[in-house]
Image (spheres, helix red, strand yellow):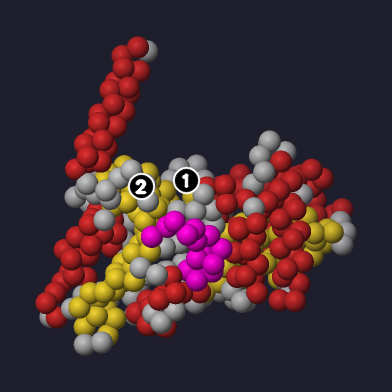
Amino acid sequence: MSSHDVNWSIISEIEDLQALWEKWDTLLANTPLDQLFNSSDWLINWIASYWEQHWQLSVHTAWSNKELVAIIPLYHQSDTTERKSAVSYPLGQGEPEHMEVASEYLDIIVSPTWYSVLKEDIYRRIQRNSNVLKWRAAMKGAYILDLLQGTEHISSPATRYLTENKKFELSMLSKNTRAQHNRALNKLKKNYQYSFRWVAPDEAFTIFDILSELHTQRWQSIGKTGAFTDNAFLTFHRQFIQHRHCAFSVLEVEGKIIAINYYFTKKGILYFYQSGWNNKDFQHLSPGLLLHCWSIKNTEHETYDFMMGAAKHSYKSKLSTSMLPMVSIEAALSMPYTLKFKFKKTAKKARHYLQQFMR
């Protein structure tokens, strides 16, 4: 087995991906990578919702005896003043921040037995047509991070928070969090008619609209609009809901929904994506905490994935049984940008030392 046994091809037109998706998912299923965000289900929907005509697709595929063994799922956002594309992204990321769906755990899709053989080829292909590669929310052991470790880069750490449902007990919570939960639940039991429940599929769109309203109200209260006011963002999620890849849990009090959790689902994992709650009238009931605890204990999925959070001081850590390191990275792929990144790092260190000296 060597790189000479492989034929590479490049897909540069969106329409040509159609013939690849089935083999894409077959290869993905035989890797340890996340099976939701790297899947055709997710990426087809992302392309339909966010793709812009001036972006340049650059998906590289490696084949051995007609078997797909590797995919480099890239595209470029061009700057016409540059010989190379200004910035490259993985498919599924790079949409404007105010409307981003925030895909996580993306990676180079490659058969584990082929990675060491193709590693140098993969890096050369990533580096060839771009000045900068931006890749957010990668797992610490991701292929892409291994490939970029020798580059000049800027990275920011984060954490993936997971709960194995069989291991979760209220007794594992910190003393303060457990007391907060118990106080809120006692108030709920004493003063209200209430129920926790999973939402039936035929209710999903109605619940999503209520979630959008609750989420937007919360953002507007701090002077911002939030992503739920953006048409592309809403289109993405409504399409995903239509294909039954989602779940919702709700807390109802006196017949009124006061908290909603919105999840993606795939292969035994419940991915917590977004929430909305009525803080104005029910903040004293800690509805977000109560709904998380109920949902963790009452899901049929094995793993409750809080997804990416801050590396320190995240509320997600209070409810998690394991924490895995993540990294977002911006890597220089050409010499001018390598020098630019080195200068930025040096300037940042100089500012830090100056601040320390001036204290």
Residue farthest front in this picture: 80
Q: Is residue 344 above or below residue 108?
A: above
Q: Main secondary structure of the magenta part?
A: helix
Within the magenta stretch, is there residue 52? yes
Whether residue 254 appears in this view of the structure is: yes
Near-viewer residue (178 or 46): 46
Q: Is residue 256 left or right of residue 101?
A: right
Label 2 with label 1: CB-CB less than 8 Å: no
Mark 2, residues whose alpha carbon is within 10 Å: few (<14), some, or many (≥20)?
few
**Is residue 189 in the magenta section?**
no
Q: Which residue is mark 1?
A: 310
Q: Secondary structure at mark 2?
A: loop
**257 or 152: nearer the eye?**
152
Tag in front: 2 or 1: 2
Quadrant where the C terminus sits is top left
Left or right: where 282 falls relative to 35: right
Q: Which residue is mark 2?
A: 80
Residue that extends furthest to the bottom in the rendered view of this protein: 65
Q: Which residues are magenta?
A: 42-56
Amino acid on which the number 1 mark rests in the picture: Ala
